[in-house]
Image (cartoon, rainbow, N blue to C red):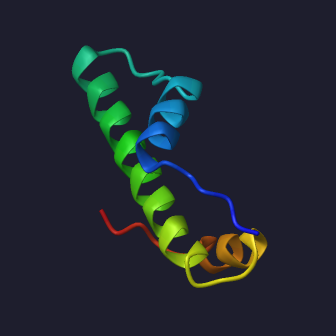
Amino acid sequence: MTLSIDPKEFAKLALMANPSNSESVEDKAKDSLELYLSAYKLAEKYARFSNTTQETSEAFNSIRDIDINM
């Protein structure tokens, strides 16, 4: 059984759980954008792997060491 992860919702939750510690507004925006995009892409990759594997753990192990390449 695999889990279904909505990339948009996952990225939003990751962003809310990890606020930027930067001081300037511009740096906070950059940090937030980078985190959002990274989380979104990671969830998309998980979804692709989970469609071709039987177990969630197999899909997770497949994406664990993949670079996001932003």
Q: Nearer the viewer, residue 53 or 15?
A: 53
Q: Nearer the viewer, residue 6 or 42?
A: 6
Question: With respect to residue 24, does 16 lie above or below?
Answer: below
Q: Position of residue 4 (x, y in %)?
A: 60, 56
Q: Residue at x 63, y 80 (%)?
A: 62
Left or right, 57 with reference to 53: right
Q: Position of residue 61 (x, y in %)?
A: 70, 76
**Quarter of the image where the C terminus is located:** bottom left
Residue extending farthest to the left is 26
Q: Position of residue 9 (x, y in %)?
A: 47, 38
Question: With respect to residue 12, does 49 lie above or below?
Answer: below
Q: Nearer the viewer, residue 25 or 38?
A: 38
Q: Residue at x 22, y 22 (%)?
A: 26
Image-quadrant location for residue 53: bottom right
Left or right, 63 with reference to 6: right
Q: Residue at x 68, y 70 (%)?
A: 60
Q: Position of residue 57 (x, y in %)?
A: 77, 71
**Quarter of the image where the N terminus is located:** bottom right
Image-quadrant location for residue 23: top left
Left or right, 33 with reference to 63: left
Q: Residue at x 49, y 48 (%)?
A: 6
How many discs mark residues in the rendered view?
0
